[in-house]
Image (cartoon, rainbow, N blue to C red):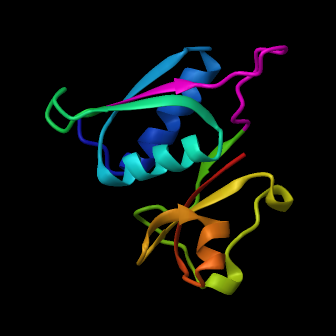
Amino acid sequence: MATTDPIADYLTRMRNAMQAKHRIVEIPSSKMKKSITEILYDQGFIHKYKFDDNAGKQGVISIALKYDKASKTPIIRKMGRVSRPGLRKYSPASELPRIINGLGIAIVSTSKGVMTGKQAKKENVGGEVVCYVY
């Protein structure tokens, strides 16, 4: 079944896997999803990831989720979609959202590629606010 919003599907698969305490989640691949995965890794929200471009029609992203060692709770507390196909949300560089006073990240799709809200502010580029993670 083709999803109308692949990014929402990505976030939902991640949330469901964390709720079920899975170590690894596999998600159909795309350029945007690869970029989001790399950002989550760079920011320390996930343990590891692997892109397998030979699996299936479009390839698969395998993501090793990260949990707190003591409490066994997922590192990612919340993930949410901001801009969706029915209602796109764009922000200029000066109005990019701060997620929980800078503890979380906003993922923004800009003309210079997909990056965090902080990076976009630093490079002074606005764009579509894809999602937030904290």
- 11 relative to 6 in the view: left or right: right
Quadrant including the N terminus: top left
Residue 75 vertical position relative to residue 72 in the rendered view, above or below: below
Question: Is residue 31 in the magenta section?
Answer: no
Residue 130 vertical position relative to residue 18 in the rendered view, above or below: below
Which one is in front, 101 or 17?
A: 101
Number of residue marks: 0
- 106 relative to 31 in the view: left or right: right
Quadrant including the C terminus: top right
Which one is in front, 20 or 112?
A: 112
State the extent of the magenta-drawn residues as a range: 61-77
Q: Residue at x 64, y 60 (%)?
A: 106
x then y, percent, for residue 128:
50, 72
x then y, percent, for residue 49:
45, 31
Residue 114 appears in the figure: yes
Q: Main secondary structure of the magenta part?
A: loop
Q: Residue 9 occupies which quadrant of the picture?
A: top left
